Image: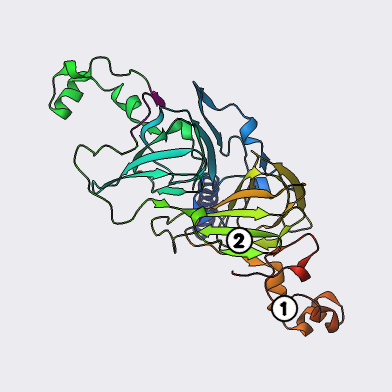
Amino acid sequence: MADFQRRDFLAGAAAFAAATTAALVGTKQAEAGDPSFMNNVPDPLLANEELPTFKFALEKSTGKVIGNSFGKEATVKQLPISKGIAGVSMRLEPGAMRELHWHATAAEWAFVIDGRVRTTVIDPQGNSETNDFNSGDVWYFPRGHGHMLECLGQEPTHFILIFDNGYFSEFGTFSITDWLGHVPKSLLAKNFGLPESAFDGFPKEEVYFARGSVPAETPVTPLQGRTLPPLTHKYELLSQTPHGIFKGGREWRVDSSRFPISKTVTGVILDLDPGALRELHWHPTADEWQYIIKGKVSVTLFGSHGRYRTEILEAGDVGYIPQGYGHSIENVGDTPSRALLGFNTGEYATIDLSQWIAGNPVDVLATNFSKPASLFEKFPHRDVFITDKDGAEKSESQSR
């Protein structure tokens, strides 16, 4: 082989190897949830001829149970489609505490369904905040911030945790007893300036749920005194006026514009009357994680190339919609439904089908569908968002 041919061959082979390596690395990073590759490397799970299931019966799973407290999670292990968001249903009995811990790979957003919760969180500047939460309240802890959760009062509490990483596992977090239980006493004594005997009887393994007496109604002052962070970790979501009121439902929404510390998660409470529909829409900048608090809904997912899938979700079920995929939520039960929706973005964004059509000239629509322009004059001239059981023409938003 001539020298120039050999050089060309070697150069081409090297380029091919580099491209192949880059593709493989890119795929590996995409599968690991690296957002920089989300729109460049197709998700193999979503590239098949049929869409995968996007439903998981969270409350029917076992999870981790200690006494009358539990934690049940939905990650990519339980619901493979949910690569961008994970969720946990947690119940704490009176006197129980989710011990001091932190999450290395995800921020935590929570909505309280029942009961009362007290949290204490510390930031890297050493500021700490203790808050009491009631039903309808929300908290947000940035990634890596140490915190604890405890039941307040004589009734159990139930809350839903949302994490901005589908590969996150609640059962793989960093707990304080797990850490101290595996550090030599000599190192602990040196760290805290105490005799080794001070650590006699400390747990040797992770406690996870610690149990003691019911906390006092007034929080005890931290050892260092009160040094509040610049941004609060608490937001009283359901105490606010709904973001939207419609003939057919209501929506409460909170993103970083209202809750500044919540930079990576937006939360929505969606109420639908029987027969009402959250219209066909998509979210251009985020995945959507759904937890059905009550009722029965039909969720339809559209995935291009004629692919769609419908799942029926009931109370305790979880649904997941990948970023940019069209979908709708319809109450198909006989009673009002309520859904908690979480998005892995701090800035909420949506495009609704009625809004899209109303934003185009009628001649464009006529050409697109090969129908007379007069037909599209009858379509809604604004965003519908939620319709009641009789359809869009009777749905009027009072706010948006």
Tell me which numbered mark, 1 or 2, is placed earlier along the sequence.
2
Picture residue at 49% right of the left edge, 55% below the top: 239
Which disc is residue 283 wearing?
2
- 175 above or below 348? above
- Discs 1, 2 touching: Cβ within 8 Å: no
Coordinates of residue 28 in the picture (x, y in percent): 53, 45
Residue type marked 1: His
Q: Choose between 90 and 388: the one closer to the eye.
A: 388
Residue 296 is inside the magenta segment: no
The answer to whether residue 49 of the structure is visible from this angle is no
Q: Which residues are magenta?
A: 206-216
Q: Is residue 396 left or right of residue 378?
A: left
Q: Secondary structure at mark 2?
A: loop
Residue 212 is inside the magenta segment: yes
Residue type marked 2: His
Which disc is residue 381 wearing?
1
Coordinates of residue 274 in the picture (x, y in percent): 75, 52
The answer to whether residue 332 of the structure is visible from this angle is yes
Q: Is residue 119 left or right of residue 52?
A: left
Q: Choose between 115 and 377: the one closer to the eye.
A: 115
Coordinates of residue 331 in the picture (x, y in percent): 74, 51
The quadrant where residue 184 appears: top left
Q: Secondary structure at mark 1?
A: loop
Picture residue at 24% right of the left edge, 39% below the top: 221
- 346 above or below 226? below
Picture residue at 50% right of the left edge, 57% below the top: 345
Local crowd size for mark 1, using a 10 Å CA cut-off: few (<14), some (14–19), many (≥20):
few
Local crowd size for mark 2, using a 10 Å CA cut-off: few (<14), some (14–19), many (≥20):
many
Q: Main SS of the magenta segment?
A: loop
User: Tag count in the figure?
Assistant: 2
